[in-house]
Image (cartoon, coloured by chain):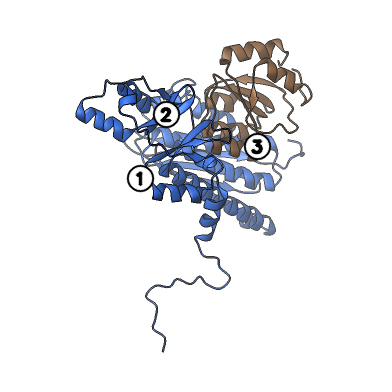
Amino acid sequence: MNPTPAVETNPKPGEKPAVSFAQELVHELRVRDAMTSLTVTASATDSLRSIQHLMKTHRISGVPILAQDELVGIVSIEDIINALDKGHISEPAEGWMSRKIVTLRDHFSLVRAVAEFDRHEFGRFPVLDGNNRLVGIITRGDITNCLMHHLERRAEEVMAQEAARVAPRADDEKAQRVVINADVKSGDFDSAGKLSQRMREVLRVRGIDPDARRRAAIIAYEAETNIIIHSLGGRITASIDPHKVSIEAMDSGPGIENLDLAMQEGWSTAGPLARELGFGAGMGLPNIKRCADKLAIQSELGSSTRLHAEVLLQKAGTSS
Amino acid sequence: MKLKTSAELPPLLALVQASPLTKLDGVVLTGCYLSDLLSDVLANARPGVLWVTIQTHRNVVSVASMKDIAAVLFTCGRKPEAAIIAEAARENIWLLNTPLTTFESAGKLWEAGLR
């Protein structure tokens, strides 16, 4: 008699193992897809202190050191910590930078990059292009982010295709409703616009007029970024019916202190990071108001905010 | 407002010292919009324009795609990450960058008749 396996590892018939797409990705994606493109370098005569400031300003953990355009070393956050600890933070980089540099090529596959991380003990690799030019820097975190981004994108594509495929087959209106929702995390600027994108795809497949499509997308995007910038997190839902889209954004606080002020163009309470990224113009709610055919906002300070907006739909080419 | 077909584009771009980051494929510009504020672009940019900005964040592609913006010119030598460039290529948004400042780029584009 065969012993019972402790863990079921075989996929069900006709179902691919869950890891296969990720495995495919690490072979397909290149170092250049995942790396941070190079904008920040220092010279060997720069002080470690000035390099520490560069890291802080640009939120990076390693700075390549160039002499006459040639890569001669790298200063990592570990080097900076050592310098602070041992008191040589004011000295030039050349005395303390790591000179043993292993580089990767931008055309290497990510699977090869991962192998290099395993082989060496470095936290980051400088990346060279075919002409030996330094073009970027890559960390394990960059690889993880890149893979997550592609996996997420793929999942969304499948969901949008599924939503668009299933809906138009039904006869009655209720059955044609497609509901898309997404959890929105506070401060997660990289994910802004994902729900909006999925919603647009459904509207496009249904042949909805571009102006209505655009207005619905702007409402969803502004509502989503509002949750990212101002709230502790929340959820956004788009219900797409044949004749209207309803967008519902609900957060878990802290509420809007003065809704009249918030509706005023140019008034914003956004923080410095949001402003640096081009948010916080004080136009979010006014934009939503301009684009919506119907809008209701309920908010109380110390409690949650709920926004409900509707856009009426018509097929492209039909008169209003 | 002038239309710039792909035949007219290369000299216009040489004028602002722009280098393409994605492939030029049947781009027609209907005008130009300058802003570093995403909500402002969502509110005021017209479809088909060239958007000039210093912002290189992922959200630039989201906003451009939402507003059917044809092309984005990054100024002051800024360049978005490779993943963002790839995303723009998928969305059919043409990306370029220039070492010039936003002000210098705008001046030259206006002079060239992109109004």
Q: Vertical placement of B18 versus A186: above or below?
A: above
Q: Nearer the viewer, residue A36 or B30?
A: A36
Q: Position of residue A56 (x, y in %)?
A: 35, 27
Look at the image and give the colour of chain B.
Answer: brown
Q: Quadrant of residue A84?
A: top left
Q: Residues within 10 Å of mark 3 (few under 14, many from 20)?
A: many
**2 and 1 marks in contact (CB < 8 Å):** no
Mark 3 or 1 closer to N-term? 1
Which circle marks residue A212 in the picture? 3
Nearer the observer, disc 2 or disc 3?
2
Measured Cα–Cα span from mark 2 to mark 1: 19 Å
Measured Cα–Cα span from mark 2 to mark 3: 55 Å
Q: Residues within 10 Å of mark 2 (few under 14, many from 20)?
A: some
Mark 2 or 3 closer to N-term? 2
B76 relative to A301 in the view: left or right: right
Chain letter for blue, please: A
Which chain hosts label 3?
Answer: A
Mark 2 or 1 closer to N-term? 2
